[in-house]
Structure formats: C-alpha cells, structure tokens
Image (cartoon, helix red, strand yellow):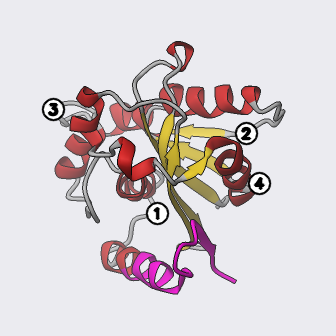
Amino acid sequence: MDAVTVIDFETTGLEFAKEDRIVEIGAVKWSDHRITGIYDALVNPGRPIPAEVVRVHGITDLMVEHAVTLDVAIPELLNFIGDDIVVMHNVEFDSGFLMAQMRLLGIQRELTYYDTLPAARKKFLGSPNYRLATLKNFLNLKQLGTMHRALADAYVTLQLYLKLENLWAVDSKSQLERQLRKLTLQREPGARFIVAP
C-alpha cells in the first residue's frame, strides 16, 4: 500500500479567490500500517479572521498573531508530504487552497490526491449525509480534540480512509490513538511537525 499524508485545513472563509487564506494545517502521515508523522500548526493568514468563521473553528486573530506565515508553512508542508498520496475529505476545497497558495509562492509541483468524500458516498450508503462529523459518528471513529480543528479532522479522515480501503483491523482505533499520542509526546516543544525515524 502506498504511503499517504492526510491533510485538513482551517481557513478564514470558503473562497481563495476572495482572499480567504489558511489559518491552520493538520496532517497525518501513514505508511507500513502505522502513523509515521504529524504536522500541526496555526498559520498567520495575513488578514483578519471573520467572526462567523471563528464561531466554526474557534481560531482567533490573537491565536495566529505570532504563528508561522504561509510562505514558510506551505514549503514545509510540501516537504513533509514527500512523495505520498495526499488524502483529503473534499479534495476540491482543501486542494484548491493548497494549489492557489503554491501558485502565489511560485511553487510548481504535481500532487496525487485521494478524495474520501466521493468514496464514502459510494461505500456508506446509509449515512444521513457525508460531512466528516456525520461520518465520524456513523462509523464510530475516534475523535481526538475538537472537530473543525485541522489535526483532529485529519485524524478522523485517516480513519475514514482506512475504512474505505479495507485497511481497518479490530484494534485499529486503539493502535492509531497510541501511535498519534506517542508522536505528539516525542515532538520537540514548539515544533510544528515530527516524522518517525
């Protein structure tokens, strides 16, 4: 099975063309049947975060005031991804932000994507809808942290991916939780990412 990096962004809004930007990046690397890395960073978007958006993800201007900027975070994230397949829930939205930001920075790179949204629509016909939070409850996936925060959503998306690809074992939930917590504890204070040796 190919290695994947599961990514989720929180943003200032829904449209990059209207100058909405990324405010948080969460990513989980998975290969060899285990979590091998995490990337977790608030990002200073260079513009105010609207109050109605703060009500969704809880990220405020004060929280990102001294955070890394996108010209640092995006190249760092691309390096973290390496040659992995990029997994997202609703690729159109998240990849749109990533590719637009890459264009602004003059970065030319092709990525291969796997979208869990259409895959879930085909496989899990009984779900009331196909929002990530709904699928989390429908499939009894483990939530770590608050939904609508990037790393928490990336972690749920990883579990969804494993279910979709028939890579889910009886003890997957407990194993993944242990792997994620171990990496989180090993990460240096203030570091945005860690990759297991």
**Mark 2 or 1, nearer chain start:** 2
Q: Residue 111 got which mark? A: 2
> Image point 66% across, 25% down: which residue?
100
Q: Residues within 10 Å of mark 3 (few under 14, many from 20)?
A: few
Rendered location of residue 13, percent (x, y): 40, 25
Indicate yes or no whether the magenta region holds residue 126. no
- Amino acid type of the residue that numbered disc 1 sits on in the rendered structure: Leu
**Mark 2 or 4, nearer chain start:** 4
**Mark 4 or 1, nearer chain start:** 4
Indicate yes or no whether the magenta region holds residue 182. yes
Q: Are marks 2 and 4 in contact (CB under 8 Å)?
A: no
Q: CA distance from mark 2 to mark 4?
A: 8 Å
- Of the pair 93 and 10, the residue shown nearer to us: 10
- Against 50, residue 112 (above or below) is below
Q: CA distance from mark 1 to mark 3?
A: 24 Å
Which one is in front in this view, the residue at disc 2 or the one at disc 3?
2
Q: Residue 128 got which mark? A: 3
Quadrant of the rendered image containing residue 177: bottom left
Q: Is residue 1 visible?
A: yes
Rendered location of residue 157, percent (x, y): 40, 51
Q: Is residue 164 visible?
A: no
- Against 62, residue 159 (above or below) is below
- Amino acid type of the residue that numbered disc 2 sits on in the rendered structure: Leu
Relative side of 52 to 153, left or right: left
Relative side of 23 to 58, left or right: right
Relative side of 146 to 18, left or right: left
Residue at mark 1? 167
Rendered location of residue 115, percent (x, y): 51, 36
Helix, strand or loop for disc 1: loop
